[in-house]
Image: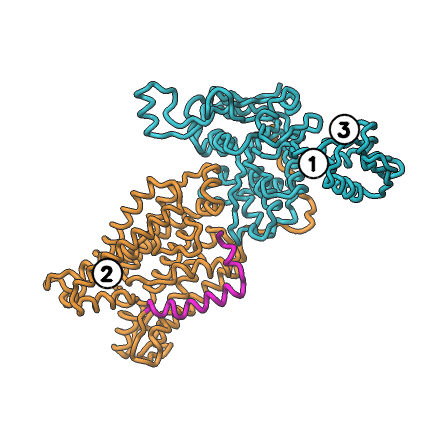
Chain colours: A orange, B cyan
């Protein structure tokens, strides 16, 4: 049997390719993240000087009590939420695209966002006057917890259905279609519910669907942070298996990988990531689909050990940028975040892809 | 005889079905499913290259999947390196047997080097980082398959032939004694087909790899295989598949190869080991001469539908002079022969005569 030590090439005609992308790129992304984070804190409808913002964030405080309130209770939590949401949605999108080998897959394909929406719709559109959205808003903090709980429960319910199906189905393409169908059923239930609801209730629900990074602070922010951190750890641990999934399920199995356990791991991680973010911030589209493509394009690699952290960085940067634009510095109004992510992000993605032309072959 | 690394004992392959399982219990049938082939007792020796041959639908892929452990057998067992396949973990199997599939891996951004490196999956830790030894295996596999120049390229940019070689390199990096390949030469042109087969033969010889490749290419299999596993529809039942294993030459000489591929309008030439398209004969024509020129003239005449006989007395005939490189055409009416300088002219004359109804 052949078991000799592999030959070492003494003088290679040209060097072997490196498996890891250049560190300078990752470093650049880190610097960009810091810059955008600070910009997000400084820019807003109220002009606060850069120096004061830094003083407040670093704990030195400020003479202007209003500024201090704005930065500590509004801008800082919002920026942190943007970073968490951007990272979470990007990583879940990346995993979905690899698992389903489909460039159009995102965190919403398995009906997770639709499930969260159903949960929220149940709370907001519930016909009884006691539980209508207006009353919920009066409840303040507890009300927003109710929405978070409803949305997480909705996401989890749909997820359990999809997981139960995932165990029985052998083919990921079939699972993808099943996920989309479950999502469609959920959405149509919401539509029917809306049809029989009062206009005011529908309006409240619609506003929730626009998405918002504001309003997550204190305990909520900690909970979101912990859940997303858990999801990210699971995702990072699945990197090796996801790399093998690039070869397709048959090759993956022949390499000794259990495709079922990878599938369940990935679905669980995605629902933790996308479910919690949707619960706290509403359904934020686009980021989950676009960021993985952007990251692959910029890093020019398919290795998930590098794509995972880089997607986190790119997602967080993009989310911060969208938030800055949504606040429209110098203006008193703020745009819905969901509209901005797609409006600003899509041209960026189109530009990057046209420039590099390597999306087409990302999956086939 | 070399040590056998892969064995099957009374293997029955096919598809499990709960409906048939119920019927099996009721009527006492042997297997709980749809049987594709049974009583397969095969052996694959170390360093042996086997071609799995059979017409479409004879169960080649089912056998490959069963041996690879992807599909459960209906009965019998598969032994890998002396250990029962069903007792091995997925990871252990992955260290004994690697596969090359017809699935197209088109993931862009995946460099050839990274793809071959994925072959080390069964050996790496939880993060999949390659040790220097792993990396040496990867580089060695790339060198051995002659894909060094492709290492930087993306898998999506490769031609079919290049991609196939890269997939073989990946299997090689997996460092298994057995490699299964499902139709590795499909979609390839002739030079690429030959190159792939030569590469596999070299791996079997130099690395002592045991290789099973399924193929439709009979002539290639006859030339390259140490042994042929031939699956053919048997005589016993309507669906039963008969499996024979033997040296290619044995199977040609005893006519079993011919029988497996027997169809109307196909003729197997045992002398050359290849199948011929059987034309409707227009009639007979004489051919006189020897050597390469005569051989190809015979082929051309057969192609346009003539039965060629070596009878110099026929009035309708062609005489070939190999050293003068010319043909003498007798039109069958007893006239003077026509001297023709190229084979196209000969065929033109014979065709024209055929349309007038001239037969020897």
Cα–Cα gap, marks 3 and 2: 82 Å
Of all chains, the one bearing label 3 is B
- Say left or right for B198 vs B76: right
Question: Looking at the image, which is closer to me, A98 or A364?
Answer: A364
SS for callout 3: strand
Of all chains, the one bearing label 2 is A
SS for callout 1: loop
Cα–Cα gap, marks 3 and 1: 13 Å
Say above or below: B42 vs B176.
above
Res B309 label: 3
Query: Image quarter for residue A119?
Result: bottom left
Q: Residue B259, how many percent across, how many down?
A: 59, 24
Question: Looking at the image, which is closer to me, B217 or A73?
Answer: B217
Q: What stretch is highlighted in magenta?
A: A337-364
- Say left or right for B325 vs B13: right
Between disc 2 and disc 1, the foreground one is 1
């Amino acid at each position: 049997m052949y078991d000799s030590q592999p030959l070492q090439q003494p003088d290679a005609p040209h060097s072997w390719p490196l498996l890891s992308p250049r560190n300078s790129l990752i470093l650049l992304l880190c610097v960009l993240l810091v810059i955008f984070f600070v910009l997000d804190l400084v820019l807003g409808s109220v002009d606060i000087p850069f120096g004061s913002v830094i003083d407040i964030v670093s704990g030195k405080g400020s003479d202007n009590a209003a500024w201090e309130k704005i930065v500590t209770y509004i801008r800082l939590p919002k920026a942190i939420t943007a970073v968490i949401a951007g990272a979470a949605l990007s990583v879940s999108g990346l995993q979905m695209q690899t698992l389903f080998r489909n460039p159009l897959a995102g965190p919403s394909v398995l009906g997770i966002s639709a499930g969260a929406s159903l949960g929220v719709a149940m709370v907001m559109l519930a016909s009884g006057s006691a539980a209508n959205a207006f009353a919920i808003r009066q409840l303040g903090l507890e009300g927003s917890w109710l929405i978070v709980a409803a949305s997480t429960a909705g996401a989890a319910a749909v997820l359990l259905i999809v997981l139960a199906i995932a165990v029985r189905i052998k083919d990921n393409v079939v699972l993808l279609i099943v996920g989309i169908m479950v999502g469609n059923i959920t959405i149509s239930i919401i539509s029917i519910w809306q049809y029989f609801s009062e206009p005011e209730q529908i309006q409240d629900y619609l506003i929730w669907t626009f998405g918002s990074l504001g309003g997550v602070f204190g305990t909520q922010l900690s909970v979101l942070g912990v859940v997303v951190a858990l999801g990210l750890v699971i995702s990072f641990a699945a990197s090796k298996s996801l790399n093998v999934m690039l070869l397709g399920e048959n090759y993956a199995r022949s390499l000794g990988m259990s495709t079922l356990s990878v599938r369940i791991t990935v679905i669980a991680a995605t629902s933790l990531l996308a479910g919690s973010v949707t619960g706290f911030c509403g359904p934020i589209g686009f980021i989950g689909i676009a960021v993985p493509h952007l990251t692959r394009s910029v890093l020019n690699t398919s290795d998930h050990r590098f794509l995972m952290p880089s997607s986190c960085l790119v997602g967080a940067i993009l989310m911060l940028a969208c938030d800055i634009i949504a606040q429209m510095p110098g203006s008193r109004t703020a745009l819905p975040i969901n509209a901005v992510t797609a409006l600003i992000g899509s041209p960026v993605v189109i530009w990057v892809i046209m420039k590099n032309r390597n999306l087409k072959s990302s999956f086939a | 005889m070399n040590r056998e690394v892969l064995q099957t004992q009374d293997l029955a392959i096919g598809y499990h079905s709960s409906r048939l399982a119920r019927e099996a219990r009721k009527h006492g049938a042997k297997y709980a499913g749809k049987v594709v082939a049974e009583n397969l007792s095969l052996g694959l020796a170390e360093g042996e290259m086997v071609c799995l041959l059979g017409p479409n639908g004879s169960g080649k892929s089912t056998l490959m999947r069963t041996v690879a452990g992807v599909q459960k057998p209906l009965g019998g067992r598969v032994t890998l390196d002396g250990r029962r396949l069903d007792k091995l973990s997925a990871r252990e199997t992955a260290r004994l047997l690697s596969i090359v599939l017809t699935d197209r891996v088109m993931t862009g951004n995946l460099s050839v080097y990274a793809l071959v490196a994925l072959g080390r999956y069964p050996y790496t830790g939880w993060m999949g980082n390659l040790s220097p030894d792993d990396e040496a295996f990867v580089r060695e596999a790339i060198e051995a398959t002659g894909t060094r120049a492709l290492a930087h390229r993306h898998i999506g940019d490769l031609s079919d032939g290049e991609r196939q070689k890269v997939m073989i390199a990946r299997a090689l990096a997996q460092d298994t004694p057995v490699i299964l390949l499902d139709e590795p030469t499909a979609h390839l042109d002739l030079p690429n087909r030959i190159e792939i087969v030569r590469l596999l033969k070299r791996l079997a010889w130099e690395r002592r790899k045991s290789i099973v490749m399924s193929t439709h290419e009979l002539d290639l299999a006859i030339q390259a295989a140490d042994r042929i596993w031939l699956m053919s529809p048997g005589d016993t039942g309507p669906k039963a598949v008969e499996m024979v294993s033997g040296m290619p030459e044995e199977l040609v000489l005893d006519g079993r190869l011919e029988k497996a591929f027997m169809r109307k309008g196909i003729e197997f030439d045992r002398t050359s080991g290849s199948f011929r398209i059987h034309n409707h004969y227009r009639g007979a024509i004489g051919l006189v001469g020897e050597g390469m020129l005569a051989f190809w003239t015979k082929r051309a005449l057969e192609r346009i539908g003539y039965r060629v006989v070596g009878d110099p007395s026929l009035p309708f005939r062609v005489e070939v002079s190999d050293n003068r490189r010319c043909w003498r055409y007798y039109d069958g009416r007893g006239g003077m022969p026509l001297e023709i300088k190229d084979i196209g002219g000969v065929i033109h004359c014979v065709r024209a005569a055929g349309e007038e109804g001239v037969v020897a």
